Image (spheres, helix red, strand yellow):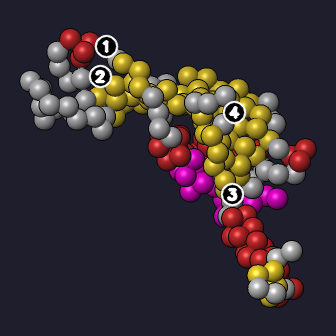
Amino acid sequence: MNRIDGKRLCNNGCRGVIWASVLILFVTFSQGCAYFTKKAPGGGGYARIFSYSFRDTWSGVIDALGSAPIESIENTGVNGTIKTGWIETDSDTERSGLFFGRKWKARYRFRITITSLSAMDAGTEVTIHAVAEEKSPGGMQANTWQRKATNGVLENDFLQKIERWMPKNPAF
């Protein structure tokens, strides 16, 4: 009954403060062109919904890819998939031993799925699945790439890069 020692814990003023807090949280988290990032269903990918038309989002993804090698592109006008080739970089792996001080090599590729949510008038969803591999600078392991799990950093960095390439005014 919300009473301690005969005093009521929450009166109508308390409820108003709670509702105002909920409203402030809702407004805070719903602002911006990309309003959330989530782990995609099925694992292995990350998704974000952009408040832009499919065409603007598609252009933003292509611009964000820049000079990355592209293996395939499929675009139906309401959804599409882009598969990149391998993008090589230095790995963040550091191991000691005979080849201490030399950088490990890393490479990754993306499968980017872009889906219009216009039936729900909710923008466009971009889902990114990354595959990452690394190899040592020398020794027997230098001849083969070894698959490694992604921790979401590559995917989220690319989603942020897409957001930077988006136009300033959403189409919706």
In the picture of the structure, the residue carrying the numbered disc 2 is: 135
| Crowd class of label 4 (few under 14; some 14 to 19; many from 20; radius 10 Å) | few
Q: Nearest the camera: 11 or 123?
A: 11
Query: What's the distance in space between the residues labelled 4 and 1, CA to CA?
Result: 31 Å
Residue behind mark 3: 35
Which residue is label 1 attached to? 144
Identify the residue at image location x=58%, y=30%.
Answer: 44
Give how far across and how far down residue 109 sits, in percent.
Answer: 49, 28
Q: Amino acid at mark 4?
A: Pro
Residue position marked by numbered label 4 in the rendering: 41
Q: How many marks?
A: 4
Q: Which residues are magenta?
A: 159-172
Q: Is residue 114 above or below residue 120?
A: above
Other-residue count near label 1 (Cα within 10 Å), few / some / many at <14 / 14–19 / ≥20: few
Q: Amino acid at mark 1?
A: Thr
Mark 2 vs mark 4, foreground winner is: 4
Helix or strand or loop: what does disc 2 sit on?
strand
* Residue 27 appears in view: no
Three-letter amino acid code at disc 3? Tyr
